Image: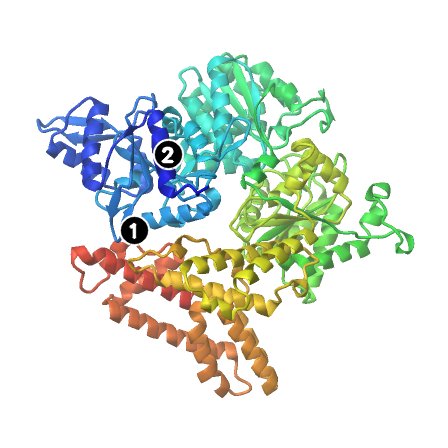
């Protein structure tokens, strides 16, 4: 049986789309595209346009970047009619999304810096809004993804830039199909491509089934008009994932057709804020809803949610800094309010607010509660439901309260269903891991004591007393373990960690140990801590859920000893970061709370020590490890573990959980409760030995293609090179996971360290080859492969590392010097970040290092050499391209500050002699590449 070709796949898709009601149209090039657009806009707007009128429209459509064009699409375009009056054109009908004109075309040819032909294009009212790129069965979808990126660079902006109106891409190899929002190439990530699914989260992967469901005209136009969010602060388009789509649909349908409540069970890390924002945004547009109130139960979430909501739609939310402001917002025309549970409770309880609030009792409102597994299990919930007579309440949670994990309070044992009614949509942790929306956990249980004579372990639960669990010898053993293994767990501290302990007393002991060992020179980790200092601090061991109070409340009694200790620790923090925080008042402490969270996210803090804080509601992609020395269970355990499993690039392959207590029974039970009974293996990584076996298999595949390093040079075709790239990429992916296990030992693997480094060097040679050949007319098939360079570069292996090796060389014997020099050459060959610097470093070693006096400082000498080489390169760049030197310095300074390459117009603006109009694009692109190469060589990775 022959394999279906890409052309056959394309033909079958177009035939299916025609059956679904898409009109087939032939569009060969931009001239055809423009002509068709004019006709379609006339039909849609029931008007006719003269050539002069349409020219105005075209010129307006040509303006702006992708984000600005997305806003234009959702607006009306004005133009001056020939008779002098103003006309308006609707580009897409958002209110009645099915009432648009739908066309499908294929093989449109656009010519920019290169000529490209696109596979299948879907047009709505003549504008290309969806681009479908296909690969034949058996090829990786990543190739189609990379191909769309290449089209963006080469030709999407050609002519009037109408392909800038694309809202969605669809990529497929027939068997697997994904979609994603259009954004600039440097803001796209393959991790942000999604499978479509049905309401039960069963993925729809086959292209024909995907087209039947997702590409149906009304569904697709609804997705574009209702379920793409324009993220204002980041200037990005965000397409909702299927489970988010269904959750919002269920809430909106519930409000439109019933007065019932409901809740959404979407696992932690799945984007509940975006889902709740979209639900709130749609509901505020309903004439039947007076107000939408988004309720959180912590100050940081109040701040964070307001910031996120306003980043989705600028000015959509007014912050309520006190209860009086909240009451004012209830009385005015603010459609969407974000507030805390505490302020809402005050608004309906205090006499001074009731005069205003009483008039709102019967108004139809919708309340949306974030993290409702924690916020709604007290008397406040009853007070809210008793006060508002015409309110619908919806809760969002990643870990619902069931009968099994409910805690008894003043109102008895209550479940999420008791309070909110029916669960409207579920997306549990197994769904999210399957879809690669969150990571699996690697859980290691570290034994910290043995039974008498070391014969057998003692169950923690049997002897869980302060005498044993808080014994200084045990705590020091754990501290030493963390110091020894932290770098491997966090990939040489490219990620950060959190450590949760049972109480403030134990936290103090750990903090003092870390600080003492730091002063003794045993580590250089940046340790920070925060905890509540109220007199009646929550004992996290009381119920094992770890959901005690996060913030000290004003007017509450204070534990003086705890506060004194925390004040000293904040002093250490201030000294470390040049800040000035304190516990003297709640504002200063809250500022500290926010700052410490920001620094964890920015990877400025290595380990954050906590009791309860930050174990729920805190999202940091840079956090990949949690050290646990406290008893956790049920939702508290899942919430704490889930701090580590946000996706962040290829190197972050899993969330690491290091448990210093016997939490396995509790972990198994929590997974069973919040996923399904047979799903444990889908959530927890397989044992270390399984990954060793996978590595051995991947290495065997690699050696079958290229038995030796030298055999890579004998590969004849790009197809052979692609096979090597894919095989070695599998090796480094598995090695990346293995390195996070504490028992990792490279010497036991079939590829020893030197052989692996040699293969890695050849892999990088091919990467450099592809980058260097992008200027050729012929497009390499390797260009669309994913090299995953991120996996083989290490932040700590930089110029400073080389200088350290050179310093060590100064006092060594000739034989030892030769060995160190070989090590340096190997590092220069195999570290991606250093390859651009290789020639200059080799020249320094050959021409300067040998002549240095024995007492010379290698670092100082290298700095002088490097600065001279940098200035020489800068002068050469300026002279070769005719750039104004001072203006070039400003361009570089701005590049380093914003981390964004200069724009073409900025580069043209600093030229002594501007090139002809037809040459500006190519000249500017050449100069930009030179500027990027200069920064990569002389600045990035140089400390």
Q: Quadrant of the rendered structure where residue 644 is?
A: top right
Which secondary structure, mark 1?
helix
Number of numbered discs: 2
Q: Which residue is mark 2?
A: 12
Colouring of the image = rainbow
Q: Which residue is mark 1?
A: 154
Can you give x and y, in whole percent of width and height, for residue 870 in the image? Answer: 37, 72
Q: Quadrant of the rendered structure where residue 926 is?
A: bottom left
Compare residues 163 and 95 and report the one nearer the observer: 163
Can you give x and y, in whole percent of width and height, for residue 865 in the image? Answer: 42, 78
Which secondary structure, mark 2?
helix
Q: Relative to 510, say whether 107 is above or below.
A: above
Q: Image check: 109 left or right of 485?
A: left
Q: Is residue 430 visible?
A: yes
Q: Image check: 621 left or right of 454?
A: left
Q: Image check: 700 left or right of 927?
A: right
Query: Sequence-wise, which precedes: disc 2 or disc 1?
Result: 2
Q: Is residue 942 visible?
A: no
Marker disc for residue 9 = none
Can you give x and y, in whole percent of width and height, for residue 708 in the image? Answer: 54, 68
As drawn, the residue found furthest toward the front would be 1
Q: CA separation, marks 2 and 1?
A: 28 Å
Taking the spot 32% from the left edge, 47% from the top edge, the residue there is: 152
Estimate how packed mark 2 is, as few (under 14), some (14 to 19) or many (20 or more) residues with alpha carbons within 10 Å.
few
Q: Relative to 795, say whether 55 is above or below.
A: above
Q: Nearer the viewer, mark 2 or mark 1?
A: 2
């Amino acid at each position: 049986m022959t394999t279906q070709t890409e052309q056959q796949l394309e033909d079958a898709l177009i035939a299916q789309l025609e059956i679904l009601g898409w009109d087939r149209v032939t569009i060969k090039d931009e001239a055809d595209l423009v002509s068709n657009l004019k006709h379609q806009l006339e039909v849609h707007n029931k008007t006719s346009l003269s050539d002069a009128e349409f020219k105005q429209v075209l010129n307006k459509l040509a303006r702006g970047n992708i984000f600005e064009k997305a806003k234009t699409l959702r607006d009306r375009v004005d133009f001056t009619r020939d008779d002098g009056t103003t006309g308006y054109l609707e580009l897409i009908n958002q209110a009645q999304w099915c009432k648009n004109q739908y066309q499908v075309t294929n093989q449109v040819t656009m010519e920019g810096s290169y000529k490209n032909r696109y596979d299948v294009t879907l047009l709505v009212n003549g504008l290309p809004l969806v681009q479908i790129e296909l690969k034949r069965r058996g090829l990786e979808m990543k190739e189609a993804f990379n191909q769309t990126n290449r089209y963006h660079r080469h030709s999407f902006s050609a002519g009037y830039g109408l392909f800038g109106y694309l809202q969605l891409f669809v990529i497929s190899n027939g068997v697997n199909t994904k979609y994603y929002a259009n954004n600039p190439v440097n803001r796209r990530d393959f991790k942000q491509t999604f499978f479509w699914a049905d309401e039960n989260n069963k993925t729809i992967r086959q292209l024909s089934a995907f087209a039947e469901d997702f590409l149906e005209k009304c569904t697709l136009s609804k997705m574009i008009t209702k379920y793409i969010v324009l993220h204002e602060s980041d200037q990005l388009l965000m397409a909702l994932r299927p489970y988010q789509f269904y959750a919002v649909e269920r809430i909106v349908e519930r409000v439109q057709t019933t007065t019932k409540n409901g809740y959404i069970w979407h696992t932690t890390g799945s984007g509940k804020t975006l889902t709740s924002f979209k639900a709130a945004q749609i509901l505020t547009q309903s004439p039947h809803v007076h107000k939408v109130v988004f309720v959180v139960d912590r100050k940081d979430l109040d701040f964070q949610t307001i910031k996120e909501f306003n980043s989705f739609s600028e000015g959509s939310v007014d912050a309520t800094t006190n209860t009086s402001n909240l009451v004012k917002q209830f009385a005015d025309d603010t459609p969407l309010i974000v507030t805390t549970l505490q302020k809402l409770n005050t608004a309906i309880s205090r006499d001074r607010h009731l005069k205003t609030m009483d008039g709102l009792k019967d108004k139809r409102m919708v309340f949306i509660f974030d993290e409702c597994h924690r916020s709604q299990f007290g008397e406040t919930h009853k007070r809210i439901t008793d006060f508002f007579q015409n309110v619908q309440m919806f809760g969002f949670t990643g870990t619902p309260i069931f009968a099994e994990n409910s805690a008894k309070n003043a109102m008895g044992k209550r479940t999420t269903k008791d309070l909110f009614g029916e669960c409207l949509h579920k997306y549990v942790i197994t769904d999210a891991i399957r879809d690669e929306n969150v990571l699996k956990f690697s859980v290691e249980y570290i034994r910290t004591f043995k039974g008498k004579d070391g014969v057998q372990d003692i169950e923690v639960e049997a002897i869980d007393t302060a005498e044993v669990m808080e014994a200084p010898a045990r705590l020091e053993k754990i501290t030493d373990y963390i110091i020894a293994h932290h770098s491997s767990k966090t990939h040489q501290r490219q990620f950060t960690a959190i450590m949760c302990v049972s109480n403030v007393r134990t936290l103090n002991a750990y903090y003092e140990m870390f600080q003492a060992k730091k002063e003794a020179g045993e580590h250089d980790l940046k340790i920070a801590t925060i905890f509540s200092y109220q007199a009646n601090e929550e004992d996290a061991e009381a119920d094992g859920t770890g959901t005690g109070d996060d913030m000290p409340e004003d007017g509450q009694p204070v534990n003086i000893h705890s506060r004194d200790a925390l004040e000293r620790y904040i002093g250490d923090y201030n000294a470390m970061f040049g800040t000035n925080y304190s516990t003297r008042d709640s504002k200063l402490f809250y500022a500290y709370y926010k700052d410490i969270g920001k620094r964890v996210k920015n990877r400025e803090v290595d380990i954050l020590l906590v009791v309860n804080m930050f174990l729920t509601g805190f999202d940091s992609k840079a956090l990949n490890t949690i050290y646990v020395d406290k008893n956790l269970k049920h939702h508290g355990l899942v919430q704490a573990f889930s701090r580590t499993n946000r996706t962040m690039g290829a190197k972050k392959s899993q969330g690491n959980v290091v448990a210093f207590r016997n939490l396995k029974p509790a972990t198994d039970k929590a997974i069973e409760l919040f996923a399904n009974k047979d799903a444990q293996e889908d959530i927890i990584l397989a044992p270390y030995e399984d990954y060793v076996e996978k590595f051995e298999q991947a290495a065997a595949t690699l050696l079958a293609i290229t038995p030796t390093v030298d055999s890579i040079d004998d590969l004849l075709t790009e197809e052979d090179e692609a096979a090597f790239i894919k095989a070695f990429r599998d090796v480094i992916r598995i090695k990346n996971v293995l390195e996070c296990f504490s028992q990792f030992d490279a010497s036991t693997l079939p590829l020893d360290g030197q052989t692996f480094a040699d293969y890695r060097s050849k892999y990088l040679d091919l990467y450099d080859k592809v980058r260097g050949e992008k200027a050729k007319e012929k497009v390499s098939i390797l260009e669309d492969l994913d090299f995953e360079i991120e996996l083989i570069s290490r932040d700590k292996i930089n110029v400073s590392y080389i200088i350290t090796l050179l310093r060590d060389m100064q006092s060594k014997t000739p034989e030892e010097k030769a060995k160190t020099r070989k090590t340096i050459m190997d590092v220069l060959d195999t570290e991606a970040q250093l390859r651009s610097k290789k020639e200059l470093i080799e020249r320094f070693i050959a021409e300067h290092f040998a002549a240095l006096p024995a007492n010379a400082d290698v670092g100082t000498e290298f700095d002088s050499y490097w600065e001279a080489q940098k200035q020489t390169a800068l002068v050469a760049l300026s002279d070769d391209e005719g750039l104004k030197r001072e203006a070039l310095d400003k361009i570089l300074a701005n590049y380093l500050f914003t981390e964004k390459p200069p724009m073409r117009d900025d580069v043209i603006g600093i030229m002594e002699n501007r090139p002809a109009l037809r040459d500006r694009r190519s000249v500017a692109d050449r100069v930009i590449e030179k500027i990027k190469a200069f920064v990569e060589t002389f600045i990035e990775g140089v400390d």
